[in-house]
Image (cartoon, helix red, strand yellow):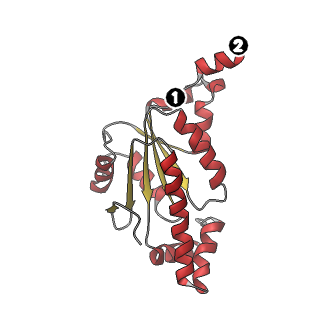
Amino acid sequence: MRQAMNKALNQRHARHVIVIAGASGCGKTHLIKRMSQPPHDDFVLKLLQQLDCDPNQRFKRSTVERMQRLLDPNNAKKRKTRKLNHCLLIHLDLTSINHRSNLVLLQQIASQTERLDVLTLYTPPLEWRERILQRLHTENEPSMRAALIALSARFSKRFSSFLYHREYNKWFTVLQALKTDHTCMANSFSELVFKSLPS
C-alpha cells in the first residue's frame, strides 16, 4: 500500500505533448524534424498557430515507448526526464503492426500529460499509394500493413481507398476518447490544412 502511494506521489507528468499521427509515408518523420529544428518555416508556423502553440518553446523528438519510460516513477531521478519540461513530439504510425499496443501506451501518456495536442497528417490515396510503392524494397520500407493496403489497389483502387480511409476513421474514433486540447489535420506535402477528412 505504502509503495503504491509513493509511486503515485513520484509519478511524473509531461508539460506538453504533440502527437504527429498518420499512415506510413505521410511525412511524419520529416515534419517532426522540421518542427524540432528552428528557425521554423511558414508551414510549421501555420501548424503551430492552428494548435495554439508557442513557436519559441523547445521541441524534442520522442516515441510512445520512450515517453512511457520517461513517465515511469522508477526513472524519476534520471536526467533524461528533464525532457518532460519541453514540448515533446511523438511519432504515431496508424498503419504500424504495433499500432494497437502504441494506442494503449498513448492513452497512458495522455493521462500523465498536462497538455495534449494532435496533428494528423493525411495524403490523398492515389498519391499515398505511389509513395508507398516507391518505398518498397528500400531502406525506408513502409509498414507491412501500409504495403498491403497500397498493393490491394491492383485488384480494386476503390477497395484500397476504403481500407486507407478506414485507418483514419478508426483513429478519429480513438481521438474522441482522448482528452486533447487542440487538433489539426494537414497534408505535409501540399502544405494544406483540412477541417475534416477529405472524401
Return the x and y of residue 94 as percentages of the image width and height.
56, 59
> What amino acid is at disc 2?
Arg
* Residue at the farthest bottom position: 155
Is 42 situated left or right of 59 in this image? left
Amino acid carrying mark 1 in the image: His
> Which image quarter: residue 70?
top right
The residue tagged with tag 2: helix, strand or loop?
helix
Badge number at residue 197:
none
Q: Which residue is mark 1?
A: 13
Q: In this rendering, is residue 159 above or below 198?
A: below
In this figure, which residue is indicated by the disc labeled 2? 2
In what quadrant of the picture does the C terminus appear?
A: bottom left
Residue 137 at what x, y percent from top left? 64, 73
Q: Position of residue 172 (x, y in %)?
A: 49, 56
At x 62% / y 34%, what residue is drawn? 69
Q: Residues within 10 Å of mark 2 (few under 14, many from 20)?
A: few
- C-alpha gap between disc 2 and disc 1: 21 Å
Query: Which one is earlier in the sequence, the residue at label 2 or at label 1?
Result: 2
Residue at horizontal 56%, vertical 38%?
109
Q: Is residue 75 visible?
A: yes
Q: How many marks?
A: 2
| Left or right of residue 176: residue 193 | left
Of the two numbered discs 2 and 1 in the rendering, the one whose residue sits closer to the viewer: 2
Give the residue drawn at x 64%, y 67%. Answer: 145
Name which quarter of the figure residue 187 lies in: bottom left
SS at badge 1: loop
Does 125 sit above or below residue 112?
Answer: below
Asked whether the viewer can see residue 137, the reply is: no
Q: Residues within 10 Å of mark 1 (few under 14, many from 20)?
A: many
